[in-house]
Image (cartoon, grey):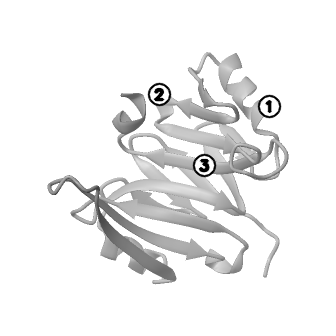
Amino acid sequence: MKSEKLLFEYYPDKGIKIDGLTLNWKENRTDNRKKLKNSHTAKDKTFDIGDGKTLIISRKDIYKNYNSKENYFFLKYDENDKLQELEVHIGATIKIIDFTIGFDQPLSNFIDELKDHKIEVTEMDRGNYLIPDYKMTMADDEHMGGNGFGLSYFYATDDISHLTK
């Protein structure tokens, strides 16, 4: 396995590139699977929260060690199989517009850089940050149950309203 990191380029309101491969928000799941060489594990679930009428639908494709690089990420889809969310857990460099951070770098330095550029950042919990204008969240190792303050979790979506209510 290569120690080289997967590159995620995130374009708010448009989508993502994974090692140069473009996936747009609302793009069809079948098409994305083909682009990513069907190297996923599907994990679709429906949860009834017990009130007899509310269902939570979870439709995600899990990728582990994509492109023979050490990484772990999810692509999540809505009930119509349109790309809605990205979660990255390990093994990546994240580029957001003109900002770049790797999973081996302190998240606080990156957050300070965003603030220096007058980008709104809200600390939802210690080490867990919401960047609403970019429709993304990031968390450090300690917040995710580990040790240290490096980037441990990156989340991006086409609709962040569920996080801002």
Q: Which mark is residue 165?
A: none
Answer with left or right where residue 56 lies relative to residue 138.
left
Q: For mark 2, does the 10 Å Cα neighbourhood hold few (<14), some (14 to 19), or many (20 or more) residues?
A: few
Residue designated by label 1:
109
Query: Which three-letter amino acid code belongs to the residue tagged 2?
Result: Asp
Residue placed most toward the observer, 46 or 113: 46
Q: Residue at x 21, y 63 (%)?
A: 80
Q: Position of residue 135 (x, y in %)?
A: 46, 37
Query: Which three-letter amino acid code belongs to the residue tagged 3?
Result: Phe
Q: Position of residue 20 (x, y in %)?
A: 57, 63
Q: Is residue 63 above or below residue 97?
A: below
What SS does tag 3 mark?
Answer: strand
Q: Position of residue 67 (x, y in %)?
A: 64, 77
What SS does tag 2 mark?
Answer: helix
Residue designated by label 3:
154
Mark closest to the chain's N terminus, 3 or 1: 1
Q: Residue at x 44, y 72 (%)?
A: 61
Mark closest to the chain's N terminus, 3 or 2: 2
Answer with left or right where residue 59 lies relative to residue 120.
left
Q: Are marks 3 and 2 in contact (CB under 8 Å)?
A: no
Q: Is residue 70 above or below residue 17?
A: below
Answer with left or right where residue 117 lies relative to residue 48.
right
Residue designated by label 2:
133
What SS does tag 1 mark?
Answer: helix
